[in-house]
Image (spheres, rainbow, N blue to C red):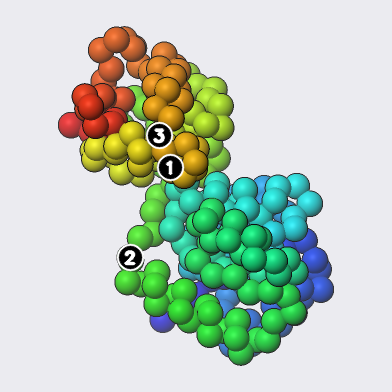
């Protein structure tokens, strides 16, 4: 069997050096990134088995990196952070992280957490291509580029999150409440007007005829579906 690949996203050279020497000695292959944007690019191109992510990155906070990764991949994410407050842990886990270790940590504990993450990933069997295509609609989930035909479509962060939430479950009906919780957060679960407004924006940008959408279909009284048939 080939060695499992771990992606380390951490701006501290001494931490990367420690992980490089310690984890390589136990048979893992390491890929390193010193900031969030580089980490996202490495995740898209290298398809690691597990991601080890610091929260205090110089360009993008690790919580946002986690959210952006979860737009297109379920690769296990283990947070390695000096932030030890409960609210930091809760925010990271709510954003999609699988586990959280506070620095300093012991190597045996980290290895145990990696093994658990590996088992969960094997059970899910969910490695994904970060490119979603439907007709002439193309969504590059990793680079966050959306095109219709040969034209790039500029989306706001909320519009992109709404579109990718539908794309991840293409063909399935997502209720108003599900979409509001996933895109805006639990506090907005009853705010249907947000959803109606942003769905209108998406249709205007992506559909040839927004009144008769090909992709973004309304299920009356229930929610919306990204149509695949």
Instruction: Tell how many labels.
Output: 3
The N terminus lies in which quarter of the figure? bottom left
- The answer to whether residue 197 is visible is yes
- Using a 10 Å C-alpha cutoff, classify the residue at mark 2 as few (fewer than 14 neighbours), some (14 to 19) or many (20 or more): few
The residue at which mark 2 appears reads as 125
Q: CA distance from mark 3 to mark 1?
A: 9 Å
Of mark 2 and mark 1, the one earlier in the sequence is: 2
**Residue 179 point in image, percent of width and height:** 38, 38
Of the residues under marks 3 and 1, which one precedes in the sequence?
1
Q: How far, Cα to Cα, is label 2 from label 3?
A: 34 Å
As helix, strand or loop, the secondary structure at mark 2 comes to: loop
- Residue 202 appears in the picture as rendered: no
Q: Residue at x 33, y 12 (%)?
A: 210
C-alpha gap between disc 2 and disc 1: 25 Å
Residue shown at 62% from the left, 53% from the top: 63
Please give the label number shown on residue 224.
none
Q: Disc 3 on helix, strand or loop?
A: loop
Residue at image mark 1: 181
Task: Assess disc 3: are there few (<14), some (14-19) or many (≥20) residues with their C-alpha within 10 Å of its C-alpha.
Answer: few
Q: Quadrant of the C terminus?
A: top left
Residue identified by numbered label 3? 190
Seen in the image, is 10 located left or right of residue 131?
right
On screen, residue 143 above or below 194: below
State the image quarter where residue 165 is shown. Answer: top left
106 sits left or right of 216 in the view:
right
Which x, y percent locates residue 18? Answer: 75, 79
Q: Is residue 116 above or below residue 32?
A: below
Kindly report which numbered mark, 2 or 3, lies closer to the viewer in this rendering: 3
Residue in the foreground of this view, choosing between 137 and 3: 137
């Amino acid at each position: 069997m080939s060695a499992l690949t771990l992606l380390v996203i951490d701006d501290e050279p001494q931490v990367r050096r420690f992980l490089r020497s310690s984890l390589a000695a136990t048979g893992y292959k390491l890929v390193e990134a010193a900031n969030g944007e580089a980490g996202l690019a490495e995740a898209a191109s290298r398809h690691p088995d597990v991601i080890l992510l610091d929260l205090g990155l110089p360009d993008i906070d690790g919580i946002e990196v986690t959210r952006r990764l979860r737009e297109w991949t379920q690769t296990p994410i283990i947070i390695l952070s000096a932030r030890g407050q409960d609210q930091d842990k809760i925010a990271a886990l709510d954003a999609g992280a699988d586990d959280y270790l506070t620095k300093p940590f012991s190597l045996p504990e980290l290895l145990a957490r990696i093994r658990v993450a590996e088992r969960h990933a094997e059970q899910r069997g969910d490695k994904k291509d970060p490119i979603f295509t439907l007709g002439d609609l193309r969504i590059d989930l990793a680079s966050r580029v959306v095109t219709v035909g040969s034209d790039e479509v500029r989306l706001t962060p909320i519009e992109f999150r709404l579109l990718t939430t539908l794309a991840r479950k293409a063909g399935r009906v997502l209720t108003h409440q599900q979409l509001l919780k996933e895109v805006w957060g639990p506090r907005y679960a009853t705010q249907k007007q947000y959803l109606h407004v942003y769905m209108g924006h998406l249709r205007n940008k992506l559909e040839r005829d927004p009144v008769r959408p090909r992709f973004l279909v309304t299920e009356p009284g229930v929610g919306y579906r990204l149509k695949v048939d």
